[in-house]
Amino acid sequence: MLGLVVVHYKVARCRFGCPPVLASGLVFLWLLASYSGTAIKPELFSFVLWNGLVMLWADQLRVANPRRSLTLAPWLMLVWANTHGAFYFGLLFLTCCWMGSCLDKSAPAGGLNWRWLAACWGATLLTPYGWNYHLQQVTERLQSDANQLAVVASRHWEPIYTATNQALHLFEYWSGMLVIMILLVGRLWGQRPTWQLVAPNLAFAGLSLVHIRTNYLWAPLWFYTILILLKQYTWSGLSSKKWNALLVLLITFLAARTCWECYTRPYRGQFLGLGLGYLNPQREVEFIETHRQLGTRLYNSYEHGGYILWKLGPETQVMMDSRAFPYRICFGEYLAFAQGQNFSEFTAKYPADAALISWRDRECLRQFIRHPSWHCIFTGPVGAIFSRTRLDTESDPTRFMGIYSSDQLLQVFAGLMDLGDLRAAEELMAGAKGRMVLGRDQLVLQALSQHLQGLRQIESKDYAGALNTLEEAARAGFYVNHSLLDALRDWKRRQ
């Protein structure tokens, strides 16, 4: 990511002559709008190669003899097809560019003609699977259960304007980018072969809007389109002190807002700072690694499989990882299992030795807690480990020290309450007190501490005090045990 930031900035400055402050602003907006493609996963390869392909496209529009840039495109597609499956977006992009040049009827000699397009398509056939690679993608999507992959990651396939994605401000960036582009295209229409710009932008602006998973595709295309359009203006007018001051203010505002919101309301499974986040069960995997007697077959939550394979594979076999495709035969059953719906049938059909279940899969977690054959042997900041055999281990009070998000704190606390592990809950709260400093974090800490106090009052048979304490904690609305409150209220009525 840092490399792409430097490359895009240098290209804007050296290839297009963009003023430094304007180049910084455009690169920064590209970075914010590309958020959905920057997760640590294999798709990063597609992210980098996609940016490289768009860079080649911009270069062939910038110069009079673009043959040198286009020569690299088939080689890039060859690497991409043998690296990650999102290379289809590259083929779609090249096809849109070719259609745009046909509409312009003025593609330069040696430009993006059908020969280069055919070479790029042909390069994607040079894989170990040949034409079957393309055929598989078609047949998979025609099957009746092909949409199951989208079900588990429904947030990733939602439009960027839905409520669950508003915290990322992706729709705001998308709207602002669209307005800027419309104004520039309207001002400059007819001054250059515009359909080569408009056709791919129409396609990928739409893709960026309808799915958060494909949102990152439009950002580099927009970035280089703006550079090409702005080149029609005199850069001196865009590097005045007034423009520079406005750009600096805009960059400062967006940067400050981004950092503040990453700190105050981080996206699911993340926090602002150094670390692995809560999608990677580091402490839990370390426990399994030091207790190999647990076995080699492991039930696990969807998002944990990749990290478990990386640390414990190939000896340890996982039930699922976020590639999902290799497990498509049992994927529907797994979805029901993760929601706690077919626990007995699933565990009988696919037996395992142990389980690492995320605190977020609460219904599945409750099934393990209730089942007499499973025993919780470890709780960590990301999930709980269950085994078919009891295992006596010493509790490590520092295992919860990596929780920096009050949202994750609530998830862990709720799971520990389901387990009835008050000691672990107290260790959790003790570790969180020095890390939760903001207003909402303090309210969460206070409410959960009051809930623990109420449980201790019940242990000492102070039911009246426990009722008052738990009702006060419930008013905060973060965690409420309704059945316990109803029992205490019933006791009060009988008194």
Image (cartoon, rainbow, N blue to C red):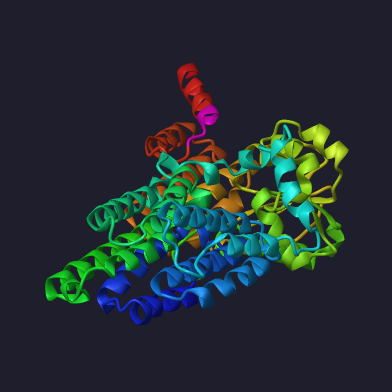
Against 72, residue 113 (above or below) is above
Q: Is residue 168 visible?
A: yes
Q: Is residue 5 left or right of residue 70?
A: left
Residue 199: x %, y % from top left: 43, 51
Q: Given the current orientation, which residue lies at the most extreme bottom position?
A: 14
**Front-most of 210 and 163?**
210
On screen, 250 above or below 318? below
The residue nearer to you, when weighing 17 against 245, is 17
Q: Residue at x 28, y 70 (%)?
A: 231
- Residue 468 appears in which quarter of the rendering? top left
Please report the bounds of the magenta region as a residue range.
480-484
Relative to 73, residue 433 above or below: above
Q: Does residue 226 sit above or below 321 in this rendering?
A: below
Q: Decide whether the magenta segment is chiefly helix, strand or loop.
A: helix
Which quadrant of the view contains residue 332? top right
Q: Residue at x 30, y 55 (%)?
A: 181
- Residue 89 at x, y = what percent? 57, 55
- The answer to whether residue 80 is magenta is no
Give the left or right position of residue 426, taking residue 313 as reference.
Answer: left
